[in-house]
Image (tube, helix red, strand yellow):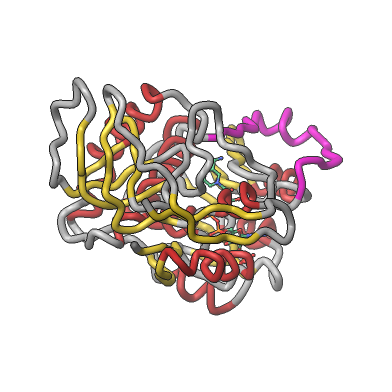
Amino acid sequence: MKAIEVKNPGQGYALAAAEIARPVPAAGEILIKVAAAGLNRADLAQAMGAYPPPPGAPSTLGLEVSGEVAEVGGGVTKLKPGDKVCALLGGGGYAEYAAISEKSVLPVPKGVGLVDAAALPEVYFTVWTNLIDTARLKPGESVLIHGGSSGIGTAAIQLCAARGHKVFTTAGSAEKCAAIAKLGATKAINYREQDFVEVVKAETAGRGVDVILDMVGGEYIQRNMSAAALWGRIVNIAYQSGMQASVNFAPLLMKRLSLLATTLRARSNEEKGAIRDALLREVWPLIESGRIKPVVDQTFPLAQAQAAHARMAKSDHIGKILLTM
Ligand SMILES: NC(=O)c1ccc[n+]([C@@H]2O[C@H](COP(=O)([O-])OP(=O)(O)OC[C@H]3O[C@@H](n4cnc5c(N)ncnc54)[C@H](OP(=O)(O)O)[C@@H]3O)[C@@H](O)[C@H]2O)c1
């Protein structure tokens, strides 16, 4: 089958079409004939040699796809060939076929196109498990979503707005702020012009926000503590500005804050299955009612994966970049 391989991993990596063996679904797995694959910032890190796939995962890039079930492995009873699905993968999405545990698979929501459905798995698995399972976001609480125009950010804003939360968010330009305000953010803050701590404090009468979803790290670690309310929870899903910081922990102590961080990719099929079940129950109805929509920035043919990576690296995109077969 056709797939994309990374040539010379590292700073100057190249993505090139290759012929590789079509995967065979093991017991409990399905084989998906891929319609589209979602790009993730982690793919760029993997291509640069900084984010190896977990044991057992394919080495080909690609953490999510949409498509049609082509075959089912032993013991799979709820899915059958021809079903239209989208799925979270440990790797292998930049290819014509991908095999994955049935526990990571969701139906394409009614009203969503087969290609656009590739924009859903990674962001909603990540946002749900971090905001709800990890940061224990409760009804009525306020949130701050950093990187609001990212794939993750556009999903988090929509989910929180649909569930009635007051949403603060940061992005790096006026154009991005205008776009993400339309997704339901109460206040979109251009972090290049405004201090998010000051804006959050001013908008909450000094109280701060209950939950912060952060992908920036670095100096944001200290500033997040300043923007958090009493008993606030701060969850990091990445540290794009740095894994190390000099931090004064006094606010953590005095405001009884929780500092949290998680990754998704290496979790067990059972853990992913529990998140999948929650998404089906809580998020898919919001998508099917039109309250939440996939936000697709641009699609590229699979053969142009390198150009798609260049677009993400430039960070001009708003929402998800997809590769189509
Ligand atoms: N832990 C996990 O399980 C997990 C799962 C999925 C994703 N992630 C991580 O989540 C992040 C987002 O993923 P993605 O695929 O959605 O990537 P993406 O679309 O490329 O988004 C990256 C975002 O970071 C923003 N950003 C960079 N510096 C910032 C700053 N100082 N303040 C505010 N925003 C800043 C960029 O916005 P500007 O261009 O406006 O600066 C951009 O929107 C990535 O770091 C990814 O690795 C983690």
Q: Is residue 86 magenta?
A: no
Q: Nearer the viewer, residue 127 or 101?
A: 101
Q: Position of residue 72 (x, y in %)?
A: 20, 33
Q: Nearer the viewer, residue 43 or 4?
A: 4
Placement of 31 over or under 36, stated as above or below: above
Q: Nearer the viewer, residue 221 or 26?
A: 26
Q: In which quarter of the view is residue 30 placed?
A: top left
Q: Position of residue 214 (x, y in %)?
A: 60, 47
Q: In which quarter of the view is residue 11 placed?
A: bottom right
Left or right of 257 in this view: 304:
left
Q: Is residue 261 magenta?
A: yes
Residue 144 in view: yes
Left or right of 50 in this view: 84:
left
Span of residues in magenta: 242-263
Placement of 105 over or under 273, stated as above or below: below
Q: Position of residue 273 (x, y in %)?
A: 33, 28
Total tally of numbered discs in the picture: 0
Ligand 1 found in image quarter: bottom right
Placement of 160 over or under 273, stated as above or below: below
Q: Residue at x 81, y 40 (%)?
A: 244
Q: Nearer the viewer, residue 16 or 119?
A: 16
Q: Position of residue 285 (x, y in %)?
A: 20, 47
Left or right of 230 in this view: 95:
left
Q: Residue at x 46, y 42 (%)?
A: 126
Left or right of 4 in this view: 113:
left
Q: In which quarter of the view is residue 70 placed?
A: top left
* The C terminus: image quadrant: bottom left
Q: Residue at x 36, y 22 (%)?
A: 270
Residue 164 in view: no
List the single residue furthest toward the bottom. 175
